[in-house]
């Protein structure tokens, strides 16, 4: 990696994954411009990253509620009087936790095991599918001016992401699900890097590859979960209040 920052010009060896973040020009991302026009990074540098993600502050009821719960819960845990939390309150907090979440220590061990013991392979038919997707994506990139150009590196990115998804599931071979996930991730990043006026047209052309956004059923499921958690929290607080009242009497 070549670095030119604060008068320091040097090259560093990098044999690991690189995650980089960049702020848009002016401090706010302009959706009417392409990704290259929003950040001061050249196309050769951008092409070396497998995935480009545009993080925007968009109003979303489900994500906003999840973020608010996380911030409030973190503040409550770090409060000076948090040590006085009773076992009942702690039990109620655990009941509100998402059962699908994996504990951080266990997740680190799982990732370490997958890296050391899993070497998934692509099959011949999978390579043909990736080649067809790459050819179509390259054709769309040439027809859409101002976007991120698609090169052979992106085909290599599809292969790496397919193998990585299979490795996370501890599979010895790459299956269609792994390839579909890699294709959707790459295409979503490609579409987000375009101007807003071109995004809708690209999504329509590539809709069979891109993952669908949250539908009404998922939003309803989130609301039902929130109501259930609020009811559990209320019942736990009532139980704590009754126990404290009986103790004082």
Image: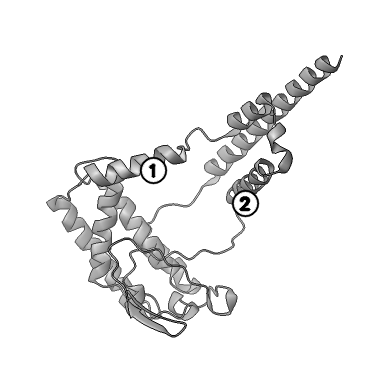
Residue at 27 percent across and 47 percent down: it is 115
Q: Can residue 177 be seen in this view?
A: no
Indicate the quadrant where residue 56 lies. Answer: bottom right
**Residue 222, how many percent across, how many down?**
58, 40
Q: Could you say which disc has been placed on residue 64 in the image? A: 2
Q: Could you say which disc has been placed on residue 57 in the image? A: none
Camera-side residue: 13 or 33? 13
Q: What element carries label 1?
A: helix
Indicate the quadrant where residue 234 lies. Answer: top right
Task: Residue at the far left: name it.
Answer: 124
Q: What element carries label 2?
A: helix
**Residue 162, how many percent across, how many down?**
27, 52
Camera-side residue: 32 or 76? 76
Quadrant holding the C terminus: top right
Specify how the rendered protein is coloured.
one colour
**Residue 219, how many percent across, how many down?**
57, 44
Q: Name the residue under label 1.
A: 108
Indicate the quadrant where residue 182 lies. Answer: bottom left
Disc 2 crowd, CA 10 A, few/some/many (<14, 14-19, 20+): few
Disc 1 crowd, CA 10 A, few/some/many (<14, 14-19, 20+): few
Residue at 66 percent across and 25 percent down: it is 87
- Tags 2 and 1 in contact by the CB under 8 Å rule? no
Vertical position of residue 41 compared to residue 85: above or below:
below
Residue at 53 percent across and 41 percent down: it is 217
Q: How far apart are marks 2 and 1 (CA)?
A: 27 Å
Vertical position of residue 86 compared to residue 9: above or below:
above
Quadrant holding the N terminus: bottom left
**Residue 34 falls left or right of residue 182:** right
**Residue 237 falls left or right of residue 31:** right
């Amino acid at each position: 990696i070549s670095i030119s920052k604060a008068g320091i010009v040097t090259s560093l060896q990098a044999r690991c994954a690189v995650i980089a973040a960049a702020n848009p020009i002016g401090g706010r991302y302009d959706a009417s411009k392409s990704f290259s026009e929003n950040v001061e990074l050249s196309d050769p540098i951008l092409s070396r990253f497998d995935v480009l993600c545009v993080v925007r502050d968009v109003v979303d009821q489900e994500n906003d509620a999840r973020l608010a719960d996380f911030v409030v819960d973190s503040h409550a845990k770090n409060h000076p009087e948090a040590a006085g939390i009773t076992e009942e309150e702690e039990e109620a907090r655990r009941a509100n936790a998402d059962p699908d979440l994996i504990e951080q220590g266990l997740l680190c061990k799982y990732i370490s095991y997958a890296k050391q013991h899993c070497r998934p392979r692509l099959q011949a038919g999978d390579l043909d599918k990736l080649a067809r997707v790459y050819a179509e994506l390259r054709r769309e990139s040439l027809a859409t001016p101002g976007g991120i150009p698609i090169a052979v590196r992106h085909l290599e990115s599809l292969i790496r992401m397919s193998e990585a998804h299979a490795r996370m599931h501890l599979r010895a071979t790459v299956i269609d699900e792994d390839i579909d996930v890699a294709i959707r991730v790459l295409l979503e990043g490609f579409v987000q890097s375009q101007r807003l006026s071109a995004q809708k047209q690209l999504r329509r052309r590539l809709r069979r590859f891109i993952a669908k956004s949250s539908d009404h059923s998922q939003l309803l499921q989130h609301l039902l979960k929130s109501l259930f958690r609020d009811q559990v929290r209320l019942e736990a607080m009532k139980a704590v209040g009754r126990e404290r009242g009986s103790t004082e009497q």
